[in-house]
Image: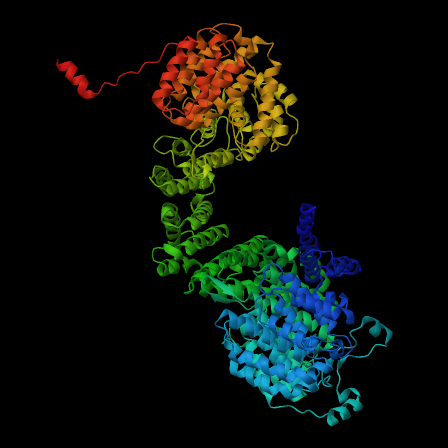
Amino acid sequence: MSDVFLQFFHAIPVLMDKYQEQPHLLDPHLEWMLGLLLELIRSEQSPPLLVHLAFKFLYFISKVRGHKIFMQLLPHEVSDVRPVLDLLCCQDPKDHETWQTRYMLLLWLSMTCLIPFDLSRLDGHLASDSAQTREPIMGRILAVAKSYLMVSDKPRDAASILLSKFMTRPDVKQKHLGDFLDWTLTRVSQASDLTMEGTMMLDGALQSLAQLFKHGKRDDFLPYAPTVLQCLDRQGLADSSQAMLRKLGVKLVQRLGLTLLKPRLAKWRYQRGSRSLAANLSQPAKPGGLVTPSLGRPDLEEEAQEEDYDIPEEIENVIEQLLVGLKDKETIVRWSAAKGIGRVTGRLPVELADEVVASVLECFSFQETDNAWHGGCLALAELGRRGLLLPSRLTDVVPLISKALTYDEKRGACSVGSNVRDAACYVCWAFARAYEPKELQPFVTSIASALVITAVFDRNVNCRRAASAAFQENVGRQGTFPHGIDILTTADYHAVGNLNNCYQSISVYIASFPEYTRAMIDHLVAMKVNHWDGVIRELAARALCNLTPQAPDYMASTVLPQLLPMATGLDPHGRHGAILACAEITQALYKLSSQTDRPVTDFLSADSVEALKSIHQKVSMTDITLMGFGGELMRPAVCTLIEKMSLSRMPFHTDPIISGWQWLIDDSLKSLHLISSGAKQGIKESAVSALGALSQEYYQIQPGAADPDMQEKLVSQYIAALRSPEVLTRCGCALALGSLPRFMIQTKLQQVLAGLEATSRITQKDLSFTEARRDAARAIAQVCTTAGVSAQGPPDSFLCPDNIPQVYCALLDCMSDYTTDSRGDVGACLWLRLLTQPLPPPPPSCPSCQRMMCCLAQQAAEKIDRYRAHAGTIFLRLLHSREPAVPHIPHQEELLAIFPSLNWNAPSQAFPHITQLLRLPQYQYHTLLGLTVSVGGLTESTVRYSSQSLFDYLKGIQQDRPALEQFGGTLLRIFQDHLRNDRVSIPLLKMLDQMLARGCFDTFTSEDNHSFCMDLLELCKEEMKKSKDIQKLRSSIAVFCGLIQFQGEVRKKVLFQLLLLLCYPYPVIRKTTASQMYEMLLTYDDVIEPDVMDEVMNLLSDTNCDLTTVRNHRNQLCDWLGVQRPTLVAKVTINQHLKEGCS
């Protein structure tokens, strides 16, 4: 029963947490749940543990629904006061396991304090017959509340609620209010926030004071308000290091300010009709706006003149502390201060309220921190929401909010301001609900543009979504935003969640509306091109490229002249972003001009063309070596500029700048090893792209004919660099050769292919240069695609029957690269990239097609799902290709029948079809090689489905001895070809163990000394010779035990190997051998004579002996098993050999 109850107890919090989003759904069930739990609590039969659990359940419900709602359901009859108080007094405040009980009892007691009877009536006769006096209930409640006000756990919060209900009772406040306030202020004065005890004391005291001044009557607490304010001033809570104490201080100060001011609804406030939709619909339409005498309301003018504002001098101090709280470093303090500003301002005359607004606007100075901006935004939202920010102030407020919507201040390697932008969106949302459309009409363009910019271009997803929500609120409430509905359908809450989509798609659509085009472009240039985040700078450059068709003249005449000085400025981020933006804008202008067969210079001025050309020289002078952080930014940016200038066909064909561009590309490719790892890939890709575009535009002396000097220079230097000792230099130069246009590799094709083939070939010296082999293979495919195919063409310019075989041979050799390092199977990325490159079909006499299909079949049978799926997809694509059809595929008709459309990622679907390739002789070797790695692998699903499919195939050929002989021969050939290749040999041994255990070769057991088992034994002996690999040795032991089923001399040899392993130096191998032999002898009872079976089993069971004892046991086993005893071979040293020779 207890276990079931504990499981239920642990399930309750999980169940309740599901209602956190919509706690009101619990309301229909609260009453019966509360009744059941209170019944357990009130029952005298309930043990203490059950009572505590019931209170914990109550706390869970209260936490989700909120104590303000839940505590109202607690019973608060007169009869409940004393039992609740007595139960609370029995609790141990130091018991941290039952704090939920004390918390709920304090809330329950606070509700019982609402009874409308004098508490003294509950005392009865305090003097008992035994002359002992009892403490009055009023005193007991006060003492308990005070004691729990100083604890360190959650009941402290409930104690402050209890005091707010208890001390505001008429009978209590007459007797104890003054004394309690004195006691509380004494604690506040004496406590220090530098200690844990002092912090807890201050927290409880401030909470209780804030609750009292919130719930108490103003007339009762007005005399004490100045004294409390003075005490807070002396304590200096604004300088406390504890954020919660500063928040409680601000909260108490605002409550004191509200106590000092008379409660009134400001007649001067701005009102936008009724807040009730039903009330608005039932009344005739009236023009909203500021309620002033000018609107025909003389009664309000008369009331305003007669209204007496008595403003105490302490209010200035209150407002000052609230304004300081707006600049606090913690959000909870700023938010509390903003709400206090709104509440206090609502009780001030219009002149003083305007001064408060002016003070709030001072937070929006660029000398202030982001905290002040955030607090100012929260305060403005509160003032606007309450109608305290008059329309006359919108002229000053809206420009500041527009700045806050793009506030972004750099701090080190990042920036601050996302909270400011989020709060500014909240201000716009509040203004949409607070003002009539005619009041915001002059500011519609500014607000709409600022919100659109934030919704599309902000780096923070929360800010983008907040801006989208604020824009939606303005469209719905105001109805004056240009193209609001159209924009909302595109830039909704979910669409703005993707940053790339915002910059490259949504921004283009919104910029198609002229009201937003210029503002979006100007924001990108001013704020995003020089952003601290490189991703934002790159996206901003692409966005400017996409927006260029919307305003080409503005881009050419205004934006580009602004960016060109930035491209050579001092700020590295600004230089990087401006260079990218200039490149993208130039190419966009070229695309526009090419539509009318005009040069791009028709858009650009002569100064702009000259400035674009000089960027490279000025940047090289600023970053002398282009190394370090500056080089990591400038190299890819300038390479992108070179690429875009070349694609834009800028008139620089005879200019010396071309040689400077070529030097930068070459230097970038050869210096990759000097660049940090994070920037290498970007620099390599940008340099390779720039080289292709530069060669295409500036190295042709006539169409299709290359400049011979540049052709010889580039091809020779890149081929020479393929032998560099730096792997990254090889990578860059290989890709550079692959990027050259056709006219640059004509007459050089054989030379280029020979260099790339040598780089892609795996050698012992260059074993770790996997990336170089990968990029060389990729470059071979690119060069072949660029050169094209010509059956009669010269092999030095085209792919033809003379050079296609060597290309296929080089690429297929790459598919056998299984290099591994700390990153795993890095060789796999080489053939994975290879399979994505289109190649021409091999000639009819070339055997490459068969090899290609066999290699694909091997990869499609291996263990890694992603690689298997990729290889399988390519296999089927080649098999089913019709335009053009791939010729010379072996067994094409059978393959078409074997392979339907299937999910290669799923082992359960792939392996049943793959294993059918084993019956096709040309595919058997490679398919079985791939299956070996899968069957002997580690992944459970792959091992299960691959082994099941393989054994199903073997089961089907048991009666076909030639097929089984062929399969065994293929298996032995794989073993022979991959001896001491742990990638294959260890999985192969595991697979052999499974095959032998399942009796897959039972057909061979009837023949003594069958060649299969003899060859397999010799291969296993060769594989494990001098090996110290525990996994390999264990797998070999299992295979030896499986070979015992074969008859003849092989059995003696197997037993001899097992007995040798029984004395292996490693204890784990000795133990494994003994255990496997024990199981083997139980399985094959014809191995040993029955009369010595027990003795053999006893010796094999004793594995905890030293090596000398084990050797004696081993020799005894040799005698019993009829095997020759192993003898130690004496090691002859060099000195002994020399002595024997001299004698």
Residue 333 higher or lower than 452, as above or below: below
Q: Where does residue 937 sit, x and y in percent of width and height?
A: 52, 29
Q: Where does residue 481 sit, x and y in percent of width and height?
A: 70, 68
Residue 458 higher or lower than 1026, as above or below: below
Residue lying at the far front of the rendered structure: 130
> Which picture quadrant has residue 952?
top right
Q: Is residue 404 visible?
A: yes
Q: Is residue 874 visible?
A: no
> Which picture quadrant has residue 422?
bottom right
1017, 40: nearer the viewer: 40
The colour mode here is rainbow
Residue at x 50% of width, y 72% of height: 241
Q: Where does residue 1024 sit, x and y in percent of width and height?
A: 40, 21
780, 464: nearer the viewer: 464
Residue at x 69% of width, y 60% of height: 55
Residue lying at the far bottom of the rendered structure: 306
> Which picture quadrant has residue 1021?
top left
The C terminus sits in image quarter = top left
595, 296: nearer the viewer: 296
Residue 327 higher or lower than 599, as above or below: below
Residue 458 higher or lower than 779, as above or below: below
